[in-house]
Image (tube, rainbow, N blue to C red):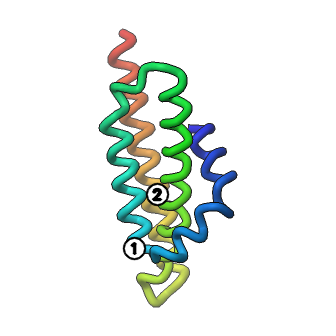
Amino acid sequence: TAIILAVSAASVLFTKGWVQRWGNYRSMQISIGIISGLLAMTSIVSNAALTVGYLLVAGLAFCILSLAQIPWALGQLSQPGLATGLYFGGMGLATAIVSWLLLNWQMTNTL
C-alpha cells in the first residue's frame, strides 16, 4: 500500500493532464477499469518484475482515480461542507470495514 501511495504521489504532475483531457467521470471509469483488471490479475503476479510493474500501474491508476474523484464528489452537492463530509466519511467507513474484515480473516486463519 505504501508503494502504491508513493507512486501515486510522485505521478500527480504527470497524470493531471490525463484527467483534465478525459474529464472527471471518464477518468474514474478508466482508472476503475484498470484497478479491476489488476485485482483480477493479483493471483498470477508471481515474480519480482511483474510485481514492480503491477505496483507502478496500480499507483498510476489510484492517482488518476484520486485526482478525478475528489472534484467530482465535491461538485455533486450544492453544499460543499456536506459533500466533503460525505466523501471523506464514506472513504473512512469503507477503510474501516475493509480493515475489520482483514483483521477478522487474519484472526480466523492463524488460529
Residue 45, position in %: x, y? 41, 26
- Taking the image as drawn, is residue 7 in sight? yes
Q: Is residue 76 left or right of residue 7?
A: left
Residue 102, position in %: x, y? 40, 31
Under mark 2, the amino acid is Met
Task: Write the residue at 46% across / 57% down.
Answer: 91
Give the answer, above or below, for where 45 lies relative to 56: above
Under mark 1, the amino acid is Tyr
- Counting residues from the start of the chain, the first of labels 2 and 1 encountered is 1
- Taking the image as drawn, is residue 73 in sight? no
Task: Write the residue at 52% across / 70% down.
Answer: 19
Q: Which of 5 and 97 is in front in this view?
A: 5
Q: Residue 40 carries which label?
A: none
Give the answer, above or below, for where 36 lies relative to 15: above
Q: Which of 10 and 104 is in front in this view?
A: 10
Q: Which mark is residue 25?
A: 1
Q: In this figure, what is the number of numbered marks?
A: 2
Task: Write the residue at 39% across / 73% down.
Answer: 25
How packed mark 2 is, by other alpha carbons closer than 10 Å (few <14, some 14-19, many 20 or more), is few
